[in-house]
Image (spheres, grey):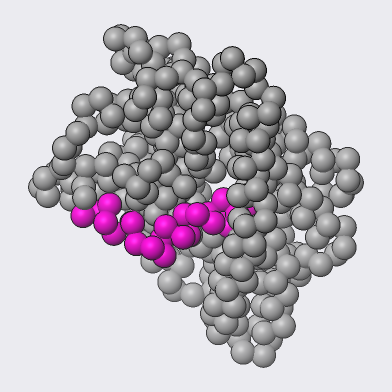
Amino acid sequence: MIDKVKFRYLDGLRGLAALVVVLDHFAISFFQRSTDASIQVHHTWLEEIVLQTPLHLLVSGNFSVAIFFVISGFVLGIKFFGTGQRHVVVSSAWRRYARLELPVLASVLLSYLAISSGILHNQTAAAITGSSWLHDLWNVTPTFLGALYHATIGVFVDAKSQYNTVLWTMQTELVGSFLAFALMVSVGKWRYRWAVYGLLTVALINSYLICFVIGLALCDWYVAYGKGFSLKKRWWIPLLAVSLLLGSIPVGTLVGTAYAGLPEWLGAGMAIPHRLHIFGAIGLLFVLLGTPALQKIVSQSKLLYIGRVSFGLYLTHLLVLGIFSCWAFILLEPVVGYMTGFAIVFAASAFVMWAVAHAFTRWIDEPAMRFASLLYQRHFPKRWKPSIEPVSTVP
């Protein structure tokens, strides 16, 4: 997926981030106290440990989203900064909406069918787990036209969708992508472009769009000056530790947690955890770029495969959670108890989510990439269209 073998480890990182998003949504659904100190419902003493320690990194879905965005900014710049050819940017920009839209449309229509047919069991399960978040999922009166609007326009304009709540990221993904395209075309070859990166970083300090700017700047720097770049152990270990620690901060209230003493100025204009997650994601990518040992770890074949299906997993896992996981938990919990029931449901759900994500990737996501390239090849003016390879994308 990632351009050439050299950067394939970014697919592994993306796969890890997608797994954390799934774990986060399981935690919010069944152990909400582990993600938010304001929740008083407890099911196990482990919830408090996860909430109060760096173990929260395992369920830090917002940190994973920041990682997605930073990787996107980096990946979108690889071919341009590697070749210096603007037509690479034009090709990516022409195909970007179609590449994102088709999988989004499929996920929303699947959600519409699930809501309309009454096969979602999230509210019944929420009565057992006590999760208000789980209860409020899919809180919409389904209409086909409404689903169609949300899939094609709404998620990119409103940054939300009652049909699939994870689609709040799509507005930032699309806007951030075109911000990166605009920067490459306008100042990508300008000797003072670093000043532009700096000014935009300050201007977008309260927005996730900063991830795309810094991700693109990292790509620019790495291609231009990063040959042979390697961090020594005395640098990459503490930098990695700090980045992961920032990423482990819970997004709920910090009152009553080990992070309650963080100065308020860290969150001026943005929630403190969200801002620190962005810094952590940037730091993580920087460390990974300069640490071959870490690159080897995240280049394992299983992680690369998860990276391949990560967009499909991201778009479909909530449906599996609402249909299968909740249904199975409702049946098992009265018989085997809360914790045993969850363990069985989680193991079974992992298999179902993998199967659905694999099918979604094979039959929807990968064809969407091919279709976007076909649109470009057939409809873009030929005089502006040199023969190029398609550029991979990141959700």
Q: Residue 46 appears at what percent x and percent y?
A: 43, 71
Relative to 85, residue 226 above or below: below
Q: Is residue 265 visible?
A: no
Relative to 184, residue 282 above or below: below
- Please indicate whether residue 131 sits to the left or right of residue 295 in the image: right
In percent of the image, x 75 and y 32: which residue is there? 153
Q: Which residues are magenta?
A: 293-317
Q: Quadrant of residue 131?
A: bottom right
Magenta-colored stretch includes residue 17: no
Q: Residue 111 appears at what percent x and percent y?
A: 77, 54
Q: Nearer the viewer, residue 179 or 42?
A: 179
In percent of the image, x 11 and y 45: which residue is there? 232
Q: Residue 207 appears at what percent x and percent y?
A: 49, 28
Q: Is residue 119 visible?
A: yes
In percent of the image, x 42 and y 19: which residue is there? 85
Q: Residue 214 appears at what percent x and percent y?
A: 37, 28
Magenta-colored stretch includes residue 309: yes
Q: Nearer the viewer, residue 205 or 99?
A: 99
How many numbered discs, if any?
A: 0
Given the current orientation, which residue lies at the most extreme bottom position? Answer: 335
**Magenta part mainly helix, strand or loop?**
helix
> Which quadrant does the C terminus fall into?
top right
Q: Nearer the viewer, residue 35 or 387?
A: 387
In percent of the image, x 48 and y 25: which residue is there? 88
- Please indicate whether residue 125 sits to the left or right of residue 357 in the image: right
